[in-house]
Every structure is written in C-alpha cells, then in structure tokens.
Image (spheres, rainbow, N blue to C red):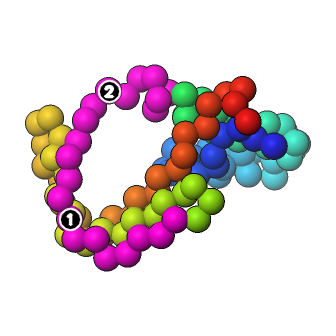
Amino acid sequence: MSQYYEHYRKSSIGLALIDSLDVLIQSGHINPQLAMRVLAQFDTSIAEALSNRVRSRATFRARLDNYRSLDDVWTFVLSSPTFRFENDNVTADKVKIVACKAKVPGEA
C-alpha cells in the first residue's frame, strides 16, 4: 500500500502524466506495471516537493457552502473566494479544498 495520497493525480500535471503513460502503454513502449510504478513515484515526489519547496503563504475569505470529514480527509466547498498571495489577489466562483492528514514516511 502506498504511503502517499493519490489526489495530485487529478492536477493538470498529474493528468498530463497519466495521458502520456497511456500513450506509451498503447504503443507498447512500456507495460502497465511500469506505468503504475511511475505513478507511485509521482505521488511521492509531488508530495515531498510541495512539502519541502513551497514556502508561499496565502490567506482567503469566502462563504462556506459545504464541508465534511471522512477518514481524516476534510472537504470544503467555498463560494466567491478571494485568495490573497504576496503580490496578487485571485477570485473564483467556487473552490473545492481537500485537506488530508499528513502522512509521514515510516509512520504507521
């Protein structure tokens, strides 16, 4: 079982990786088992990179439409959020935030 969450696979870079792996499998350049190992490494690498390299902070204000918690995974649906970064403000109609309990390698 993987020690890392797979939700980054739904990001634009994760979807691009999956599409590329599908093309490689269909063309016979790699087998599905190798593609699964690549995805597992992606899960590890993206989680570690975001944890160790991203130092930006943001604040936001929004209306909370819905929230839930299931198995240490919180999901928040926000309406009309405004995110404030160091030099920029970003707005949207709706945003879904998924927050997971941190998984520390070697920890059960």
Name the residue at 84% across, 37% down.
34
Name the residue beneath numbered marker 2: 55
Residue 67 horizontal/vertical position (percent): 41, 70
* Callout 1 crowding tier (Cα within 10 Å): few <14, some 14–19, many ≥20: some
* In magenta stretch: residue 75: no
* In magenta stretch: residue 51: yes
Name the residue at 62% across, 59% down.
71
Name the residue at 20% across, 46% down.
59
In the image, the segment drawn in magenta is: 49-69
- The image shows residue 5, relative to residue 95, as above or below, that is above
Q: Secondary structure at mark 1?
A: strand
Residue 78 horizontal/vertical position (percent): 30, 68
Left or right of 66 on screen, residue 11: right
Name the residue beneath numbered marker 1: 62
Callout 1 touching callout 2 (CB < 8 Å): no
Name the residue at 81% across, 52% down.
26
- Between discs 1 and 2, the one toward the N terminus: 2
Q: Give 15 or 45, whichever is nearer the viewer.
A: 45
Displayed quadrant of residue 21: top right
Displayed quadrant of residue 58: top left
- The image shows residue 106, relative to residue 1, as above or below, that is above
